[in-house]
Image (cartoon, rainbow, N blue to C red):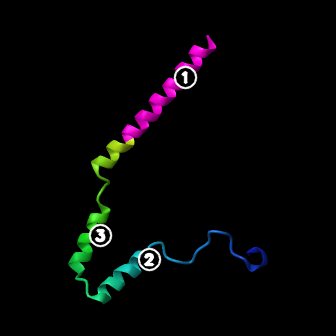
């Protein structure tokens, strides 16, 4: 039983994908063909582009280089 009949924070009765289902139904009611909706969902489910992954790797490399430079400067000052 919940304290004072209150549900814990984060407790939901709603479905996980209710917004997506509602959007699909609204689009179908507006007259969007199901084939187009299927193509949209396939495009949204594609993995992230290679360009974004390369950008993340570059950023990680830049952060590592800055870290090494800071360590080198600290070691030079300490000597």
Task: Looking at this view, name the residue that lies furthest to the top.
Answer: 79
Identified at 51% across, 29% down, the residue is 67
Mark 2 surroundings within 10 Å by alpha-carbon count, few (fewer than 14), some (14 through 19), many (20 or more): few
Q: In the displayed structure, would residue 52 be above or below residue 63? A: below
Q: Secondary structure at mark 2?
A: helix
| Mark 2 vs 3, N-terminal side | 2
Residue denoted by label 3:
41
Where does residue 48 sit, x and y in percent of width and height?
32, 54
Q: How far, Cα to Cα, is label 1 from label 3?
A: 47 Å
Residue denoted by label 1:
71
Residue denoted by label 2:
19
Main secondary structure type of the part rendered in magenta: helix
Q: How far, Cα to Cα, is label 1 from label 2?
A: 48 Å
Q: Is residue 33 magenta?
A: no
Identified at 44% across, 73% down, the residue is 17
Q: How far, Cα to Cα, is label 2 from label 3?
A: 14 Å
Front in this rendered view, residue 53 or 8: 53
Mark 1 surroundings within 10 Å by alpha-carbon count, few (fewer than 14), some (14 through 19), many (20 or more): few
The mark found on residue 58 in the picture is: none
């Amino acid at each position: 039983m919940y304290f004072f009949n209150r549900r814990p924070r984060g407790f939901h009765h709603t479905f996980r994908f209710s917004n997506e289902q509602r959007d699909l139904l609204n689009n179908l009611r507006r007259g969007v063909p199901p084939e187009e909706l299927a193509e949209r969902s396939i495009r949204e489910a594609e993995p992230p582009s290679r360009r974004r992954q390369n950008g993340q790797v570059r950023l990680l490399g830049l952060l590592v280089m800055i870290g090494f430079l800071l360590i080198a400067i600290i070691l030079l000052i300490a000597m």
